[in-house]
Image (tube, helix red, strand yellow):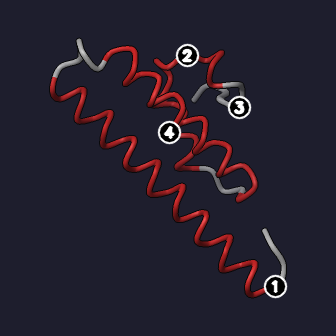
């Protein structure tokens, strides 16, 4: 896999799959939210760039990827909220 730590705007929306993969395999909780944000931004960019011309299967793939990233992002927020309650501080 390529290095996907850069700014998603510089990477281009065509790398959304690599950014999503990097987010899914990220083990560092501090980097996970950033990687999810990068993946979400790239997917939204790809949707904006090609939704009108994309095939129905490509549109479904992009929407599914966006739903996956959104679900993972919400899960990280819930986990951080739980952790802050356990440790008595905001995350």
- The numbered mark, 1 or 4, whose residue comes first in the sequence reads 4
The residue pinned by badge 4 equals: 20
Residue receiving disc 1: 87
- Quadrant housing residue 65: top left
Instruction: Check disc 1 and report its element: helix, strand or loop.
Output: helix
Whole-angstrom CA distance, mark 4 to mark 2, is 13 Å
Q: Earlier in the sequence, mark 3 or mark 1?
A: 3
Q: Residue at x 15, y 26 (%)?
A: 56
- Please state the horizontal and vertical placement of residue 35, each as a whole percent of the image: 63, 42
* Side of 38 relative to 68 (left or right): right
Q: Quadrant of residue 81?
A: bottom right
- Give the spatial CA distance, label 1 vs label 4: 30 Å
The residue at which mark 3 appears reads as 5
**At x 53% / y 65%, what residue is drawn?**
75
Q: Which mark is residue 3?
A: none
Residue drawn at x 67%, y 27% is 3
């Amino acid at each position: 896999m390529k290095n996907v730590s850069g700014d998603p705007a510089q990477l281009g929306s065509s790398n959304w799959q690599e950014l999503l993969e990097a987010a899914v395999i990220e083990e560092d909780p501090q980097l996970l939210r950033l990687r999810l944000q990068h993946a979400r931004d790239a997917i939204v960019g790809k949707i904006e760039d090609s939704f009108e011309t994309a095939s129905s299967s490509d549109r479904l793939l992009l929407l599914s990827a966006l739903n996956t990233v959104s679900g993972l992002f919400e899960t990280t927020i819930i986990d951080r909220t739980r952790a802050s309650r356990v440790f008595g501080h905001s995350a």
